Image (cartoon, grey):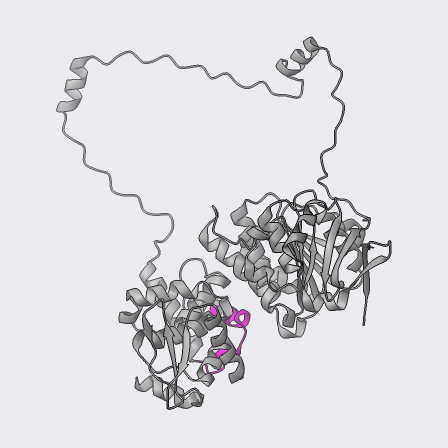
């Protein structure tokens, strides 16, 4: 079903229509400096498409909560645990409810973690619930920064991975990303590059104008036009809007944001003496602060008393108090977690189950094994499971090369970290390169072609180099690790590959 969304008017006063079905398949990037009408554009798009598609809005400033009164969006307060946000997101996809994730009041680190957990829950929903969803992320440069800033590195990695999954791999799961940013230079390139539709607003910096012109296929001399765009005026391009750059004026909206642009107001007419009274005289509703009085210092202790105290024998130390809670043996806890992960991986079908199902199985097994302490979060479980699938021994795990391989694996999306670590383990230990069937099982699929595409993805990012020797065997080299795998037959069946690795 083709649905046209009226987002405003074109240069000749004609209606500027946006093909909603095409947008769901191609994604949208909105750029504009503060005050250019970027949030107004998003609100117009959300209001016009609300009757046709489910919507999830990542709202860092609480501007879009007003959609709830008019269109029935459910406001989700992000001041929750990451596990709870992940479960809420899964139920949102199941019941097809439009929501606004309100991140207002959280610091930047907490906003990034909450958004990552929420987007992860949307992304990891079961296949039966892969209905189309319009996922709008305002101020996307906060959640997919181009460079590390003052936020915690683990929070930045989680948020960037979630945004990468949304824009790069969300389409097959029904997730259509619409991201808005103040500056293209601050947005991660691999996130911005996945959008096929663009709405570029007013910007003044040369680097942002040049990048906007490049995305729209315009010449560099035309980039100056972005300085002259008025508030609410954008240049549109993309398969869902226009095949050639088109200036669009965004139409009016039915709801209003809680935060508005500042407007000039006349100062109150108050005499100077009255103003002084207003400032220095507390009002009746104000509580007068308590005055802290400095206590009188005690009289000095006589020297004879001090000498007498020093000459007394030192009292015996008191016995340490018993701890209120039982002390957790971290070594025993780690040993039990490793045992649970090993039990999960021993199941032949575990490779083809979703991380959400494996995580629930992990939690149940931890309760059975009486694993002390708080359970692992879902992102931490994914990471531990990927490392466990690599199957490294103690000597290899303690080597500097393997630790460097773990750092490199953290730069790739979570769902392909297991594949990267399996190949890296073969390179570090000098084992034969895993076959396509073994890589496919690590990726959770039966398709060897998809496994080869993962290797191509790693190679395009410069993490490894794939070559074929004269016998047709595959060798994978890791330039950063200064090691490579032994030649391995890529067409070897999965069961024979297991026997080969067991022999090694």
Residue 444 falls left or right of residue 257: left
Residue nearest the observer in this picture, 246 or 353: 246
Q: Position of residue 446 (x, y in %)?
A: 53, 84
Task: Name the magenta segment's main secondary structure.
Answer: helix
In this view, the residue farthest toward the front is 221
Q: Is residue 87 magenta?
A: no
Q: Which residues are magenta?
A: 347-362
Residue nearest the observer in this picture, 392 or 453: 453
Location of the C terminus by quadrant is bottom left
Q: Is residue 357 magenta?
A: yes
Viewer can see residue 181: yes
Residue 5 falls left or right of residue 346: right
Residue nearest the observer in this picture, 403 or 330: 403
Viewer can see residue 72: no
Instruction: State the residue at coordinates (76%, 65%).
Output: 20
Q: Tally the marks.
A: 0
Q: Position of residue 381 (x, y in %)?
A: 46, 65
Location of the N terminus by quadrant is bottom right
Residue 496 falls left or right of residue 127: left
Residue 169 lies in what quarter of the image?
bottom right
């Amino acid at each position: 079903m083709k649905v046209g969304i009226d987002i405003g008017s074109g240069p000749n006063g004609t209606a500027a229509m946006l093909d909603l079905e095409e947008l769901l398949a191609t994604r949208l990037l909105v750029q504009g400096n503060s005050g250019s009408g970027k949030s107004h554009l998003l609100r117009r798009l959300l209001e016009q498409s609300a009757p046709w598609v489910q919507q999830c809005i990542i709202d860092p400033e609480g501007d879009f909560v007003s959609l709830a009164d008019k269109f029935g969006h459910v406001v989700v307060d992000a001041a929750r645990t990451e596990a709870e946000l992940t479960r809420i997101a899964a139920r949102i996809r199941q019941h097809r409810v439009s929501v606004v994730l309100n991140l207002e009041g959280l610091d930047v680190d907490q906003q990034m973690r909450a958004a990552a957990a929420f987007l992860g829950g949307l992304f990891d929903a079961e296949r039966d619930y892969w209905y189309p969803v319009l996922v709008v992320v305002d101020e996307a440069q906060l959640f997919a920064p181009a460079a590390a800033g003052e936020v915690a590195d683990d929070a930045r990695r989680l948020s960037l991975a979630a945004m990468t999954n949304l824009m790069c791999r969300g389409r097959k799961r029904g997730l259509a990303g619409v991201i808005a940013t103040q500056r293209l230079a601050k947005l991660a390139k691999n996130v911005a590059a996945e959008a096929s539709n663009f709405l570029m607003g007013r910007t003044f910096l040369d680097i942002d104008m040049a990048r906007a012109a490049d995305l729209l296929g315009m010449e560099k001399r035309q980039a100056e036009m972005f300085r002259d765009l008025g508030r609410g005026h954008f240049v549109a391009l993309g398969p869902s809007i226009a095949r050639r750059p088109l200036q669009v004026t965004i139409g009016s909206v039915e709801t209003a944001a809680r935060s508005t642009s500042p407007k000039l107001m006349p100062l109150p007419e108050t005499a100077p003496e009255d103003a002084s009274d207003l400032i220095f005289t507390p009002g009746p509703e104000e509580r007068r602060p308590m005055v802290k009085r400095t206590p009188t210092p005690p009289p000095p202790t006589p020297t004879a008393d001090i000498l007498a105290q020093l000459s007394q024998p030192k009292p015996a130390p008191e016995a340490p108090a018993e701890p209120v809670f039982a002390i957790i043996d971290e070594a025993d806890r780690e040993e039990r977690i490793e045992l649970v992960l090993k039990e999960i991986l021993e199941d032949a079908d575990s490779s083809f189950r979703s991380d959400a199902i494996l995580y629930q199985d992990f939690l149940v097994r931890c309760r059975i094994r009486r694993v002390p302490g708080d359970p692992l979060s879902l992102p931490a479980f994914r990471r531990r499971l990927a490392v466990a699938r690599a199957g490294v021994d103690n000597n290899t795990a303690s080597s500097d090369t393997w630790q460097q391989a773990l750092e490199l694996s953290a730069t790739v999306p979570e769902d392909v970290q297991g594949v990267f670590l399996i190949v890296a383990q073969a390179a570090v230990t000098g084992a034969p390169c895993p076959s396509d069937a073994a890589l496919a099982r690590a990726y959770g699929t039966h398709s060897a072609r998809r496994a080869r595409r993962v290797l191509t993805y790693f190679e395009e990012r410069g993490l490894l180099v794939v070559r074929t020797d004269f016998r047709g065997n595959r060798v994978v080299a890791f330039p950063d690790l200064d090691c490579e795998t032994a030649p391995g037959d890529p067409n070897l069946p999965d069961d024979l590959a297991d026997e080969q690795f067991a022999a090694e």
